[in-house]
Amino acid sequence: MHDTHEPPTADPGRAARARRSSKLFGGAPVMQFRTEASRRTFLTGAALIGVGGTFVAATRNDPRAFALSEGDLEILNYALTLEYLEAEFYTQGISGGVLVDRELELVTPIREHEQTHVTGITQLITDLGGTPVESPVFMFPDGTFTDRTMFLEAASMFEELGVDAYHGQVALIEDAEILATAASIAGTESRHAAVVADLLGGDPFPAPFENNLPMEDVLEAAGQFIEG
Amino acid sequence: MLKRKDLIRDAGLVIPGAIALTMIGAKFAFADDGDFDGPLDVLNYALTLEYLEAEFYRQGNEVGLLDGKAADYLATIQTDEETHVMTLQDTIASLGGTPVPAPQVDFGESFATADSYLETAYTFENLGVQAYLGAAPSLFQEKELLTAAASIFGVEARHAAIIGVLQEKPAEGGVYQGAFETPLARAEVLQAASPFIVSAETL
């Protein structure tokens, strides 16, 4: 189904996925941030570092832990925003009744996983002394939650983008436990991506290695759906 | 290379992530500090598991138990595992190490029926996911290797899910293993794989 022996750094599906994502909603915005400030936060990945007094006190003798957590908090807030998007998407899709029977059975746990990721990452950021970003307001085009194919194609795009996003951060996470959490979420997203691809009649195994994308590329892909 | 205990055991009480993980409820059972003797050992451990999987699908697909989409999917999975084997061999060699030889394997009655084939595949894939996640902290300081191992780990998760779909397993607990993947330590991986391994240099 695909070429073998691609190195892990190969990025074969990237152009195709970018095309798919731009085609999907015709470039229409799906995310609308509550304020311009929070949108800018999402886009730049800046201003996410709400390191509180508790955390500083707990780690003042551990400069490494303190230093690493700023970047890790930024990554966690980035992940949180993508999880907000997925959770809202599946919540609306399932309540919209776009799927039935076995397809509904296979997609319902995905909604629950994304909601759990939102809750877990939010708590993790808070425990680290950071400030979880607010959820953007998401807007999905008419038909997304009433047309099965449209829904599943959007799901596929979001899952593949999520996989790429997590794998793009693996080398940048500085705390071993946060890495483990991110990896354990990434694996779940890979399962979602495969199942959704199968439901669409697509290829659940597009390559022997997961792609990865840097934060700016993921934000660029998501940015076309952000108003403003 | 920093030992995991330097990161976690000694400093664990001041790393807040550990606290939050308890809240999340992930059952983390990472490789013990003594499990791996450096990155090459981790890679050879992964290579052994990939040998096991690649040979399993090579033998299983030859029997012709499946047809249609299931046969196509398992053919792709076989090439994925073979690619993982070659890539790990190349990586180990490029680091100046020596790739371990393939283990001697015996898959018993796994290929008796389509059902038994898929069920054993399901076991291997989920074990692979857990093994990679369990070993990940041992590659923590080797960022390129970590990224590469993670990229294999994700594909194993795809395999595991789709085999569960082919088996018509329940969604949660069958196709998916909850909102978080669960790691396994080396000893547990060895125990799970031991029925199929006659002899191996590394596990």
Image: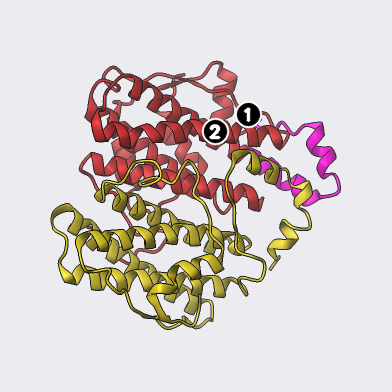
Return the mark for residue A187.
none
Q: Nearer the viewer, residue A43 or B83?
A: B83
Q: Position of residue A138 (x, y in %)?
A: 44, 20
Q: Earlier in the sequence, mark 1 or mark 2?
A: 2
> As displayed, is residue A221 above or below residue B53?
above
Residue A225, by quadrant, is: top left
Please check the rendered image and state whether residue A141 is part of the magenta-colored stretch, yes or no.
no
Left or right of B76, for residue B198: right
Q: Is residue B86 visible?
A: no
Instruction: Work out whether residue A12 or residue A126 is closer to the camera in this orientation and state it.
Output: A126
Name the residue at 49% across, 70% down: B190
Q: Which residue is mark 1?
A: A132
Q: Colour of chain B?
A: yellow
> What residue type is disc 2 on?
Leu
At label 1, which amino acid type do we have?
Answer: Pro
The residue under the point 28% across, 21% down is: A97
| Chain name for mark 2 | A
